[in-house]
Image (cartoon, rainbow, N blue to C red):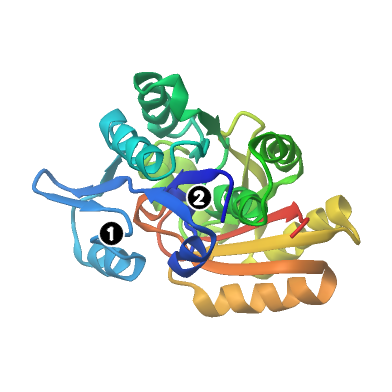
Amino acid sequence: MSNVSIVTDSTADIPKELADELGITIVPLKVHFGENEVYEDGVDLTAKQFYKRLGESDTIPTTSQPTPYQFETVYRELHEKEPDKPILSIHLSAKMSGTHQSAYLAAQNVSDDFHVTVIDSKRASYAIGIIVVELAAMAKAGAQKDDLLERLDELLQDTEVFFMVETMEYLQKNGRIGKASALLGSLLKIKPILSLTEDGEVYPFDKVRGSKKAIQHILTELSDRYGDEPVHVGISHAESAEEAKKIMAEITGRFQVRKEVITDIGPVIGAHVGPGTISISVTKSKL
């Protein structure tokens, strides 16, 4: 039995079977196609269904965060089941969403006896998941909350993420780059390699021409950072499972991989990056 309840949100893109195995509670964000179609990420809209719907729709989907009430309901249910167990709630970068703020407000609304600690991961997709999974595995093995918070500090320092998009269209529609840059990049087949700042904002790490060069550039960067360290590697993808498998095979041949996870980029993150996106997350592992 875990000594700490771990909560995250659906943008962590943790495979359901892994979340179930580790006892991770996931609070869904929402995807909206116009005013009348609203879906809960991963609950009534899977990644596969979302990308199919995206390809058929002329409507640009939007997303919304969980309400404080949703988080408060989760915290109360967890506390009711196990009143003495503290809750660690880890969420999507506050620079990208109000999800962290909703969780924080909910934590303020419940009694101090609930012992809820809300964390801004400053990351997205499995770059959140990789941190959550490492902590949940520790909790399942019997670690106490203080141990998890100490490990969390390490993970926030040691976790790196790079991602590539198939088209700049979705980044442009979501205000990440200008229309002219998106058009020029598409014409020249430029692959922007994106990452996240220390504050959790998307920034252009580099740009190269072609996917193969982009992957090799990322792997070189990761090799420089992690060397022979044991690592936990996650590849999240938007309708690019075969490419994700090829990249993982190359990574496992070059790095000391202790745990590997391939997962779908879910509807909420997918709405902002589009199909064909590949994200590589790595952290030093103690699993």
* Rendering coords of residue 233 (x, y %): 69, 62
Crowd tier of the residue under label 2, counting other residues whose Cα lies within 10 Å: few below 14, some 14–19, many 20 or above: few
User: Which residue is denoted by mark 2 in the rendering?
Assistant: 184
Q: Residue at x 71, y 78 (%)?
A: 249
Q: Residue at x 8, y 48 (%)?
A: 36
What is the quadrant of the N terminus in the image?
A: bottom right
Disc 1 and disc 2: Cα gap in Å?
Answer: 37 Å
Front residue of 141/274: it is 141
Is residue 253 rendered to the left or right of residue 208?
right
Front residue of 55/43: it is 43
* Rendering coords of residue 110 (x, y %): 36, 23
Looking at the image, is mark 1 or mark 2 earlier in the sequence?
1
What is the quadrant of the C terminus in the image?
A: bottom right
| Label annotation for residue 43 | 1
Q: Nearer the viewer, mark 1 or mark 2?
A: 1
Please say if 103 is above or below 204.
above
| Label annotation for residue 169 | none
Please say if 37 is above or below 109.
below
Q: Residue at x 31, y 29 (%)?
A: 68
Please say if 144 is above or below 241.
above
Residue 10 shows in the view? no
Provide the secondary structure element on which disc 2 rests.
Answer: helix
* Rendering coords of residue 219 (x, y %): 77, 62
Q: To which quarter of the image does residue 214 belong?
A: bottom right
Front residue of 67/30: it is 67
Is residue 70 rendered to the left or right of residue 3?
left
Crowd tier of the residue under label 1, counting other residues whose Cα lies within 10 Å: few below 14, some 14–19, many 20 or above: few
Outermost residue to the left? 36
Front residue of 73/193: it is 73
Tally the numbered discs. 2
Residue 234 shows in the view? yes
Of the residues shown, which amino acid type is indicated by label 2?
Answer: Leu
